[in-house]
Amino acid sequence: MTDSEALKRAHAVRHFNRFYTQYIGALHEGLASSEFSLTEVRVLHELHRKDGQTASALGRSLGLDSGYLSRLLTSFERRDLITRRPSETDARQSLLGLTEHGRTVYVPLDNAALCEVSALLEGLSALSQEQMIVAMKLIERMLNPAPRVGAVTLRQPRAGECSWLVHRQAQWFAAKYGWGASFEGLLARIVADYTQRDDSPRETCWVADQGGMVVGSACVVAVSATVAGVKLLWVEPDVQRSGIGTQLLGECVGFARRAGYTKLTLTTASVLDGLLRLFERAGFRQAGKAPAHRFGQEMTIERWELDL
């Protein structure tokens, strides 16, 4: 690897991996002098969580070598911790489950693990706890090979989240398109004007919350007595094309109608073709476009409108 930045990032990930595995190992050592290894506890946990799994499914779920898992399950069977029963759909497969003795053995291990983690969290402030949990969820979301879908709740921004939206969007557009500091200034001005006006009957803002993480946003602000504009429309790149943008824009349209506006407008750059398709599907029409020098770049600015 010759890219110095890529190498630096790889070292950072390895450093975190070493720290975390050592920390988890230290936590496990305190589990009531357990006779079970960390891997064995993970297998017991998975069987307690979901009865009737096959060994192959269990191995895939936990990323375990089939030979190692087979030996571990044989040991569990000898100790009367698990049962095997034939699959009704595939005679070659056996379905695994915990015995009553297995459940009796596992529950104290699970309780001890919860106590250990609770003791860890108690040493942190509530805000630090939330920060750590969000960071963990973000790592899981970014690395999970499964489709990144999940229930999304639209809610009002909490303290600090409007500023975070400015930070996140400025950061991403700078990395992706080279947009300069003036774009961040524009975002900050939109947020400042919206929060200082505090005109809830006529203006509103949503963030899309997925599992406690903000993955999108949209605001409706007054342009005139009859015209409203959509601002800060954003969906995190790794969860795009999952309907979040459609959900956010639909809420904007509904709010604008209820607030008595007769027109809803949007202004964007032509390079953001995904947004343009979203506008078209929502019934907006292009009202004009023109070349412009914005944020240190040459671009085409488009205006879109929806009659309400």
Image (cartoon, rainbow, N blue to C red):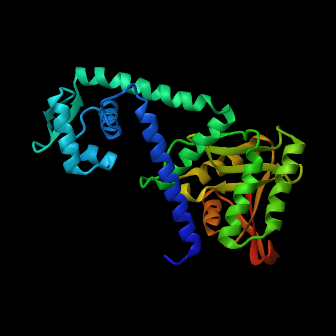
Would you say 202 lies left or right of 88 here? right
- Point 65% across, 49% down: residue: 248
- Point 83% across, 42% down: residue: 202
Tell me which corner region of the image, top left, top right, bottom left or bottom right, holds residue 199: top right
| Camera sees residue 282 | yes
Front residue of 165/25: it is 25
Would you say 26 lies left or right of 131 here? left
| Camera sees residue 141 | no
Front residue of 208/78: it is 78
- Residue 190, position as x, y percentages in the image: 83, 54
Front residue of 223/179: it is 179
Would you say 288 lies left or right of 151 here? right
Tell me which corner region of the image, top left, top right, bottom left or bottom right, holds residue 78: top left
- Residue 227, position as x, y percentages in the image: 83, 53
Front residue of 285/26: it is 26
- How many tags in the picture? 0
- Point 33% across, 46% down: residue: 61
Work out whether 2 lies above or below 6: below
- Residue 197, position as x, y percentages in the image: 89, 43
Tell me which corner region of the image, top left, top right, bottom left or bottom right, holds residue 131: top right
Work out whether 182 lies above or below 196: below
- Residue 68, position as x, y percentages in the image: 22, 47
Q: Residue lying furthest left in this view?
A: 91
